[in-house]
Image: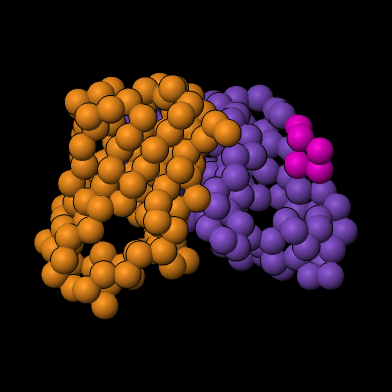
Amino acid sequence: DGGITQSPKYLFRKEGQNVTLSCEQNLNHDAMYWYRQDPGQGLRLIYYSQIVNDFQKGDIAEGYSVSREKKESFPLTVTSAQKNPTAFYLCASSVGQAVEAFFGQGTRLTVV
Amino acid sequence: GIQVEQSPPDLILQEGANSTLRCNFSDSVNNLQWFHQNPWGQLINLFYIPSGTKQNGRLSATTVATERYSLLYISSSQTTDSGVYFCAVDWMDSSYKLIFGSGTRLLVRP
């Protein structure tokens, strides 16, 4: 099936630990994105990547890191520097700029 | 930066009723999308509509780019329409940034 796969669906971590969220797509899309959603809120952009080996900070990049070594994959690491990491994280991809974007099913991260 | 405002923030309907959701944006955009977020958090693509009018079953959308707004119409609403509806825009002054409004939370009662 073509689409965007995020794993895991639910993730629990202790405070102070780094954690990596996976995002894989088989749509042959060039652009990939990470968003964060807090309860009752809209989505805010963390990082985005237009092509392999290149990525840009979004509006709330502090405490997060990404890599884009393969076209299909765009993992997000939530570091211990992120002050309030508990949230719903959504990954998206698109063919390019100003075209339709599609989302994965999300990962709910809870830090205790 | 660009502002994206959605109204109303909350809407409660009886099954079978019609509704109109609005999205206003403060600057020119390359792209506008409407999404439905279901109770499990999945974002479902409804419309990719930078301008003009589109229809898909009971849903339709209109974007008037020159006046910087878009409308989502839901007719004969069903309980499965419940959830949050988001409008997102790709701002002309940015690259690859899809910026979201805060959403309209819809509850359809049987």
Locate the N terminus of chain A and report the quarter of the image it occupies.
top right
Q: Note the chain letter of the purple one.
A: B
Outermost bottom residue: A112
Q: Note the chain letter of the orange one.
A: A
Image coordinates for residue A9, horizontal then vertical, percent: 44, 58
Question: Is residue B100 depicted above or below B79 in this figure?
Answer: above
**Front residue of this view, candidates B12 and A33:** A33
* Range drawn in magenta: B55-59
- In the image, taking residue B11 as reference, residue B2 lies left or right, namely left
- In the image, taking residue B100 as reference, residue B56 lies left or right, namely right
Is residue B57 in the magenta section?
A: yes
Q: Is residue B45 visible?
A: yes
Question: Is residue A58 depicted above or below A15 in this figure?
Answer: above
Q: Is residue B65 visible?
A: no
**Front residue of this view, candidates A21 and A31:** A21
Image coordinates for residue A90, horizontal then vertical, percent: 41, 49
